[in-house]
Structures are given as structure tokens and as C-alpha cells.
Image (cartoon, grey):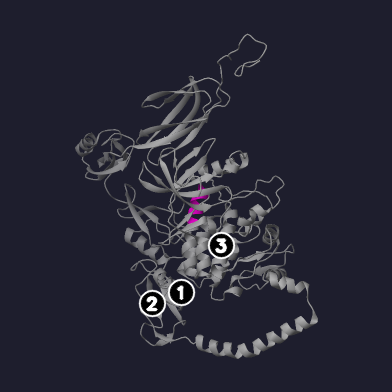
């Protein structure tokens, strides 16, 4: 039985079962007795407690996730880095890994792949925006919940620490998804994660890894040197657009990939809207500048075929290959010929039956969104999509279809043309200055701009209801989905408007009284805050001038529950005397006596919102923390060395005492 199961960590976490074994840490399902919830705790293995590199990587993980807050990233609740045990307390995920799901399903549909990858890219986009690069993106690090939600785990721990930058067997767990620059030990960034996402997409769509080999080194070399087989050569049902996205993410040179996770998401969104879209990406794959290859139409490279042939042989075939004799070869060839003669007619007969597609009635798609139609798993039609724009219908709604619903029967895999209301592309803002508001709106509508907001301004030199200016300005080329702001002459003169007072830090009743006396209507919204109950923490607008009777929103603090945060402080080593341990916050101060020889000391703070805590050892500032009670976490702001000013005790003898210093 595992030595931790059945134990309690720090008097709080009951360890119930071992649920995961990793290279440097084990994961346990635990019960948090204070917050009454299940959590997952990752504990660094004992053999690595004295390994500085593994300890650094373990701490890096907690630091990386601590700055992240995203629904598709696992949450961290608590950390502890003591001498005897180091652990991270995380959100408990009741699900399976994406790798397990892929193994179960063998091949995922493109709709499933898009659904899952969209969540992964959203998580990575958030992480990259915070300066965190995962470096170990693989399906084993993706948890899949029963509702289809993805949670990205194991942030910040995968990196090659070997100073010689040599691939070893220890890297085999990640090497199938590793980017070329990572395999070489070069600088990594967000595009490194994008490559790994591309490999995962390849595996989901085809049921196979793009590169496989006998050891980590051979696979890493394939990432560096070999062009993978096109996914459609393995699974012809894959749409060309999603294949292009996959292969662009997997380009050898980082500059040839998507520049960001958000850019890749944008292409996936375009594909979801129109699965027949082609991006026409072309990639340079050789040093010769004339050799380009279309990502969709390329076939197998000669070197890729050699690798595929080698990797597909099992151990028995290897033994046969090394002990070939003419009789054995002859026998095998005869057996194969007999099997082919017998099986091919049967296969042809079965295929002729299985490939027969039934005729079905044409459903009515008009009025539905294009997403719900093309992503419907019960439909096998091939949809061709055209785009038009009309302001009379919602965006992305299907306006027309050919053939019409119920007009005839077609094959279940037949082609249906859909006309979708959309505003794709860019256009120049037409000349609208001086036009009446209605005429300007009509001109913008004809140009394809469907989002127009009118703002009234005072202008004595302009005709009432005429356009004074716009944003973007007329003549500017911009996206058709951009909101165009029209500044129209009219409205209340500035001299007749009322100044909005700043009521932040007033009580709710005081603020309402001030604003209503000035002539405004007041809406009150409660928000979480570390301020006292019913204190105004913000307002909208913050100031300026408004018409009489306009609405001002005030945001007041609601009473939030207090939370406790436990902070673990590593103490200086080699101190042979007790120390006075003092914790100071703006709210209070507490003092403890630390016995000599202590390695760590934990203390808890309770409060709302956030605060700053300073730790003093014998009146020396030793540590400073920023404590977030709402999220129940803390971060270190200041670290100082402790200076031992206590003279060592000596005895009048030539022999040094056990605690003295010569």
C-alpha cells in the first residue's frame, strides 16, 4: 500500500487514493476537511527531494498555474515546499485523459476534434498572454470531463534540463509531440505549443501519430527532418480545410506556423462556419527556393515511406527478416496470393454493399444557424456555403438553400448549397460626412457594415441630425464586422447637461442622495470587494456631463465570506538558537517563538479581498507576501537573507563545543 494513502497532510488534507503516477511526482485524490471538497494533490517523489532541478521544475509548475485563471486550465488551491514533502493542491478532475479517449475511439470526427482543440487553444492563448509556455502539450496532459470540457494540466514542468541538449529515453513520454526547436534545445515560445497541438490534431483525425520509432532519438530526428504523410492520405474523409490547419501548425520552422493560438483559433472558426473552405497555404520544405508544396495535395515523401515501412514491422517480422530463406519466402508469397484470391472478391462484394448510401428527404435548414447545421453529427451532407449580408436577419443564419427542403430525395452524402447571412472581409467606410443620419446608415449598410452606433454631439456649425464625423473615419478600410460610430449633430447642449460627481468611497445611501439631488436616476449593483459592506467601489460613468434624468450606475460592496490562507515559510538553516517570528499585516500583528533547528513554519491569515503580509525574524524583514483571500492563494513579493547577529556560545576549552564557532 502507498505510504501516503490514509494519512492527513498538514492536518487538513485526507489522502484517499493514488490516482496517477508520473515521472517525478504522484497524484492523489484527497479530501480538504476545511473547504469540504475533493482535491487532487501532486506530491514530489522522495527520490527527487534533494534534486535541485526537479525541485525547481516542481515549483515552476505551481508558479505557472498560479498566474493563470481560465475554465480550461486546472486550478491550484495551495502549495507546500517543505524539506520532507513538497506538494501542490489542485482542482480534482473526475474524467479521463484525452489520450485514453483517443485510444478508445481510435479516430475522432473532425467535429469532435474541433470542439476539443478549440478549448485547448483558448487555454493556451490565455497562458501565452501571461507569459507561460506549456512545453509539454500532449493528450496525456489533457483531462476530458464527461460533459466534453477539456482541462489542461501539468503546466511549466516539461523542459530538457540536460546541459548537452541530448535526447534521452526520459523524454520518450513527450517526444511524439515535441516541436523541432525543442528537440534541438533552441529557444521555445508559444509557437512551440502550437506545433504540439498540430500533432494532437493529426493523431485525433487519423488515429495515428505522424512520427513513431524505436527510441526517442529516432522520433526526434523525424520531427526535425521528415515531412509527415498528409492526414487525408490516411483518412480521406477529413475535410481539406482542417487538414490545412493541422499541417500549418506542424511546420518545421516556427515562423511558418500560426503566430499565436488566437490566430489558429480564427482559422478554426472560419472552418466551422464553412467546412468547405480552403486556405491555400503553401510551405517551403527544402533549401531550394523553387520547391514549394501544397499542404493538402502533397503525397508521401520518399523518406516518410521508408520510416513508415520500418516502424510498421513487429518483432516477429524483424526475426523473419534476419533469417530469410528461399523456402520461407516462397511459402509466405504463396499464402499471400491465396489469401488475396479468396478475399478480394469477398471484399469487393462487401464494399459494394456497405458503400451503398440511402436516399433521404432534404431537411429545411432555413432559419437555423450554420453552426448547428454543419456541426450536427446526424447529418452527412456535403455543404457548400455562400455568404451574403442583410440587416434584416441575425448573423450566421441560413437564408436560402438549394435544393429546397422537400423538393426531392438525394443521397445522405449529397451536396446542399447554403446561403448564410454574414459579413466577411473588409471594405472602405463610404463618404458619409454631412449626410443625414438615416442616409449615412443606408450608405454603410450598402457597403456591408451592419453594426452602427449613433452618438449625439453638440455642434453649432452642423445641420441637426447630420453626420459630423465617424470612427473609423470615412475612407478607412476596415473589417465589415467592425462597429462604426456615427457622431451626429443634435441632442442636449453641453451647457444644459449636468456634471456627474464622483461618489466612490461614499456609502450607498450617501451616493444615491448626491446623484438623485443632482437630477440623475441611480441603479445599484452589488460586487465582491474587500471594502466594507455598502461602500461604493466604482461607478459608471466615472465623471463627465450627462443629460438630466440620465442613469448613473453605482457598484457597491457586498458582504463577502472570509477565507483562510495558509502560508509556508522556509526558515534559515544552521541557526542554533530560537528566533522571534512576527507576522505583520495592515490589519493586525502576531508573534510566535521558533525553536532552534526548525526548517519551516506555517501560519494562517483570515480575511476578505487581499492584503500584504510581512514576516520578520528577530525584527529583520525576511519575507513579504501578497495574499488573495478570494482565490485562496498567495505570492512572494520580497525575499531577504536572515543575518544571525547572535554570538555563538563557547566554553573555556581547547575543544570546540558542538554549537560554537572557532
Tell me which segment is drawn in magenta.
Answer: 121-129
Instruction: Please give the residue where the numbered disc 1 appears in the rendered image.
Output: 385
Q: Main secondary structure of the magenta part?
A: helix
Of the numbered discs 3 and 1, the one sitting upstream in the chain is: 3
Residue at disc 1, secondary structure:
strand
Camera-near label (3 vs 2) is 3
Residue 414 sits above or below residue 625 on the image: below
**Mark 1 vs 2, N-terminal side:** 1
Q: Nearer the viewer, mark 3 or mark 1?
A: 3
Return the x and y of residue 132 as percentages of the image width and height: 54, 47
Residue 42 on image: x %, y %: 50, 46
- CA gap between label 3 and label 1 equals 28 Å
Residue 316 location (% of width, % of height): 69, 72
Measured in 3D between alpha carbons, the distance from the residue under mark 1 to the one under mark 2, in whole angstroms, is 10 Å
CB contact under 8 Å: marks 3 and 2: no
Residue 400 numbered mark, or none: 2
Amino acid at each position: 500500500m502507498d505510504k501516503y494513502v490514509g494519512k492527513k497532510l498538514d492536518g487538513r488534507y485526507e489522502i484517499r487514493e493514488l490516482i496517477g503516477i508520473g515521472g517525478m511526482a504522484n497524484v492523489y485524490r484527497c479530501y480538504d476537511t476545511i473547504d469540504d471538497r475533493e482535491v487532487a494533490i501532486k506530491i514530489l517523489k522522495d527520490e527527487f527531494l534533494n534534486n535541485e532541478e526537479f525541485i525547481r521544475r516542481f515549483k515552476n509548475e505551481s508558479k505557472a498555474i498560479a498566474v493563470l485563471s481560465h475554465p480550461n486550465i486546472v486550478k491550484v488551491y495551495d502549495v507546500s515546499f517543505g524539506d520532507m514533502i513538497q506538494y501542490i493542491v489542485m482542482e480534482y478532475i473526475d474524467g479521463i485523459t484525452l489520450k485514453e479517449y483517443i485510444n478508445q475511439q481510435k479516430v475522432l470526427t473532425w467535429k469532435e476534434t474541433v470542439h476539443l482543440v478549440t478549448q485547448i487553444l483558448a487555454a493556451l492563448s490565455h497562458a501565452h498572454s501571461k507569459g507561460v509556455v506549456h512545453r509539454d502539450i500532449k493528450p496525456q496532459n489533457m483531462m476530458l470531463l464527461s460533459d466534453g470540457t477539456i482541462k489542461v494540466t501539468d503546466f511549466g514542468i516539461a523542459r530538457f534540463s540536460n546541459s548537452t541538449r541530448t535526447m534521452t529515453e526520459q523524454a520518450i513520454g513527450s517526444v511524439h509531440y515535441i516541436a523541432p526547436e525543442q528537440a534541438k534545445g533552441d529557444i521555445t515560445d508559444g509557437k512551440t505549443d502550437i506545433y504540439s497541438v498540430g500533432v494532437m490534431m493529426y493523431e485525433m483525425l487519423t488515429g495515428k501519430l505522424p512520427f513513431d520509432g524505436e527510441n526517442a532519438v529516432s522520433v526526434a530526428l523525424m520531427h526535425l527532418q521528415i515531412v509527415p504523410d498528409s492526414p487525408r492520405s490516411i483518412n480521406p474523409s477529413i475535410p481539406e480545410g482542417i487538414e490545412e490547419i493541422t499541417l500549418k501548425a506542424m511546420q518545421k520552422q516556427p515562423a511558418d506556423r500560426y503566430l499565436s493560438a488566437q490566430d489558429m483559433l480564427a482559422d478554426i472558426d472560419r472552418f466551422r462556419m464553412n467546412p468547405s473552405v480552403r486556405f491555400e497555404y503553401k510551405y517551403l520544405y527544402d533549401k531550394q527556393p523553387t520547391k514549394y508544396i501544397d499542404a493538402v495535395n502533397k503525397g508521401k515523401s520518399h523518406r516518410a515511406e521508408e520510416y513508415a515501412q520500418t516502424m510498421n514491422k513487429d518483432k516477429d517480422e524483424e526475426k523473419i527478416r534476419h533469417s530469410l530463406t528461399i523456402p520461407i519466402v516462397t511459402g509466405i508469397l504463396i499464402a499471400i496470393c491465396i489469401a488475396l484470391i479468396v478475399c478480394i472478391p469477398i471484399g469487393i462484394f462487401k464494399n459494394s454493399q456497405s458503400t451503398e448510401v440511402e436516399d433521404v428527404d432534404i431537411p429545411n435548414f432555413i432559419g437555423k444557424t450554420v453552426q448547428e447545421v454543419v456541426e450536427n453529427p446526424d447529418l452527412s451532407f456535403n455543404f457548400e456555403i455562400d455568404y451574403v449580408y442583410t440587416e434584416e436577419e441575425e448573423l450566421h443564419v441560413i437564408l436560402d438553400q438549394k435544393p429546397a427542403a422537400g423538393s426531392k430525395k438525394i443521397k445522405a452524402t449529397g451536396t446542399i448549397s447554403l446561403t448564410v447571412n454574414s459579413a466577411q472581409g473588409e471594405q472602405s467606410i463610404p463618404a458619409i460626412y454631412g449626410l443625414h443620419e438615416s442616409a449615412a446608415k443606408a450608405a454603410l449598410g450598402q457597403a456591408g457594415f451592419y453594426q452602427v452606433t449613433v452618438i449625439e454631439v453638440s455642434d453649432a456649425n452642423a445641420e441637426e441630425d447630420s453626420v459630423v464625423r465617424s470612427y473609423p473615419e470615412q475612407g478607412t478600410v476596415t473589417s465589415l464586422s467592425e462597429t462604426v460610430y456615427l457622431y451626429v449633430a443634435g441632442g442636449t447642449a453641453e451647457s444644459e447637461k449636468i456634471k456627474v460627481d464622483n461618489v466612490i468611497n461614499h456609502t450607498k445611501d450617501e451616493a444615491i442622495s448626491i446623484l438623485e439631488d443632482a437630477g440623475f436616476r441611480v441603479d445599484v449593483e452589488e460586487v465582491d470587494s474587500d471594502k466594507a459592506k455598502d461602500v461604493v467601489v466604482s461607478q459608471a460613468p466615472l465623471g463627465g456631463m450627462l443629460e438630466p434624468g440620465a442613469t448613473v450606475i453605482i457598484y457597491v460592496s457586498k458582504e463577502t465570506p472570509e477565507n483562510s490562507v495558509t502560508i509556508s515559510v522556509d526558515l534559515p538553516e544552521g541557526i542554533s538558537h530560537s528566533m522571534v517570528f512576527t507576522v505583520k499585516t495592515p490589519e493586525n500583528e502576531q508573534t510566535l517563538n521558533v525553536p532552534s533547528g526548525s526548517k519551516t513554519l506555517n501560519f494562517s491569515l483570515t480575511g476578505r479581498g487581499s492584503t500584504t503580509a510581512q514576516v520578520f525574524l528577530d525584527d529583520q524583514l525576511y519575507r513579504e507576501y501578497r495574499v488573495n483571500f478570494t482565490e485562496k492563494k498567495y505570492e512572494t513579493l520580497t525575499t531577504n537573507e536572515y543575518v544571525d547577529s547572535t554570538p555563538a556560545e563557547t566554553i573555556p576549552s581547547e575543544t570546540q563545543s558542538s554549537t560554537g564557532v572557532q
